[in-house]
Amino acid sequence: MPRRREPRPAPALELKTTRLAGIQVILNSAEHAALDTHISTLFAATPDFFGGEPAVFECGRLPADAPSPDWGWLAQELKSRGLNPFAVQNASAELAASARQAGLLVLNDVAPAPAIVAAEAAPAPEPEPVAEPASAAEPAAEPAAASATRIIDKPLRSGQRVYAAGGDIVVLAAVNPGAEVIADGSIHVYAPLKGKALAGARGDTSARIFTTYLEAELVSIAGVYRTFETAPDAAVAKKPAQIRLADTSQIVIEPL
Amino acid sequence: MTTIITVTSGKGGVGKTTTSASIASGLALRGFKTAVIDFDVGLRNLDLIMGCERRVVYDFVNVIQGDANLHQALIKDKHCDNLFVLPASQTRDKDALTEEGVEKVLKELEHQGFDYIVCDSPAGIEHGAVMALTFADEAIVVTNPEVSSVRDSDRILGIIQSKSRRAIEGREPVKEHLLVTRYSPKRAHEGEMLTYTDIQELLRIPLLGVIPESEAVLQASNQGIPAIHQKGTPVADAYQDAIARFLGEEHPLRFVEYEKPGLIKRLFGGK
């Protein structure tokens, strides 16, 4: 009988590369009062939208002569709302110095600056009729999109919410009434979709929603939404369907 | 090994306490040393259903706060030798339940060699309900055949999957069981109620049993005798079946098919 090979114990430490999907916080102003007001209004409706995602301050849009923002205060404000800023990018030498002093990493020399996404790092899941589709991001510009797909293989239950930042979401189990699936890209549900599905949460009008069984409470693409007070067409109700946006302003539901 | 079973539902009035009493009694009748704890601090009911309300001296909160020891607070059941009831406090509120306190009591019961601890959860998804499910190894989710109850059960399942110790520590998840109560095959057949298959399709957890709607439950509650002791009634049989399935035995479902009453039965009454 062959001798059973002893499993080699894993080393205490291993190194691997990783790509981090996070949130860009784009600074258009360094003024304390303006930032304070905007943060308050931005997060007022959805204070717990983020669940501790890493975040990077994008400084490329700040005017050249802008003073350094109060980094410590800014980071603390965002931290209390579930975002974890750890670095600045595209910062001038002056900004970089002050950021370093505040304990933030400076990414300028580390990685090529990703293209600036026009839509701000704003939680936009509230079904607003149209959310600035004109300035919407080109999803191709998102460098981490390929690795940002989230896969969920357990049922999503009433009250649960998942958000795929910067990519698509694939759900292999039922999305029950009262559950919410949100993605910056497209949403694929290979099971009954009975809750809410919000694709293109940051304004991507080319995002789509796919399901094998449509019985949703609400669907939304880039802020354009539809509820189902009146049942959808018999061709798609409780059947495989695709939901997309036509003319950036109209929800279209088609059989798959 | 002690197994902690939480009986929960989200919604109120679906039969959690009735189920806790019957499941705990059923396990004790099978020879397991069992404790049943009322987590509904402030709205104490389990002692009434178990018929031991006149023997309550110390309660769960007293033990947590160190005013009494566990031995003083546990009440021995009238019907089963190896069943003990830990009643809730009626004068306090749910904030008296601390995570450390609950853990301490459960650990102590484990030391005393209990096989099963049944936690009777309060309704809702707030502190009391979360405390009842935090330490669960298995969960019995009690659901009535109506949409609001099913949705609340769905919600509580989500909470079990996120707030239980097993989930937080990344251990093997809490084993979930669906128990449909107050089921009327006739009304389900006529489309007035959800069928148990509808419920299971939505909640997608294994079915432990279907307990039929019956007047025997109300009588049992008023007499302070858990429904499982009402020998020969469908409710007692259905709870016995559920216990058997919980312990891994296979039993076909009973009391779920509607049979049209024949002419004789219609003429001469009967239910």
Image: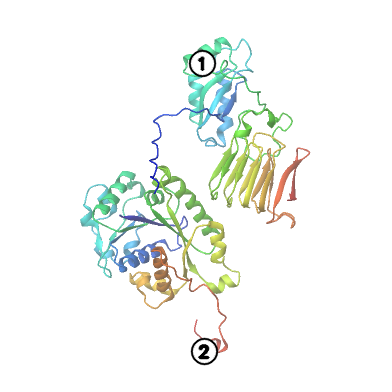
Residue A99 is labelled as 1
Instruction: Using the image, determine if residue A12 lies above or below residue B145.
Output: above
Q: Number of labelled discs? A: 2
Instruction: Residue A183: name its quadrant.
Output: top right
Q: Kindly state the secondary structure of the residue where label 1 is placed.
A: helix
- Identity, as a three-letter code, of the amino acid under mark 2: Phe
Q: Nearer the viewer, mark 2 or mark 1?
A: 1
The residue depicted at 28 percent of the width and 47 percent of the height is B104
Calculate the distance from the C-alpha at mark 2 to the C-alpha at mark 1: 88 Å
In the rendered view, would you say A6 is above or below B153?
A: above
Chain bearing mark 1: A
In the picture, measured across the screen, residue A84 lies left or right of residue B98, that is right
Between A234 and B251, the one lying in front of the other is B251
- Which percent across, then down, holds residue B221? 37, 69
Residue B178, horizontal then vertical, whole percent: 47, 60
The one nearer the camera, B39 or B31, is: B31
Q: Report crowding for label 1: few under 14, some 14 to 19, many 20 or more residues within 10 A (C-alpha).
A: many
What residue do we see at 70% from left, 56% from top? Answer: A237
- Quadrant in which residue B98 is drawn: top left
Up-down relation of residue B27 to residue A28 (above or below): below
Asked whether the residues under marks 2 and 1 belong to the same chain, the reply is no
Colouring chosen for the image of the structure = rainbow
User: Which numbered circle lies on residue A215?
Assistant: none
Type of amino acid under label 1: Ala
**Mark 2 residue crowding within 10 angstroms, few (<14) / some (14–19) / many (20+):** few
Residue A20 occupies which quadrant of the picture? top right
Asked if residue A64 is positioned above or below residue B119 in the image, the reply reads above
User: Which x, y percent locates residue A7?
Assistant: 40, 40
Q: Residue A4 at what x, y percent from top left?
A: 39, 45
What residue is disc 2 on? B268
Secondary structure at numbered mark 2: helix
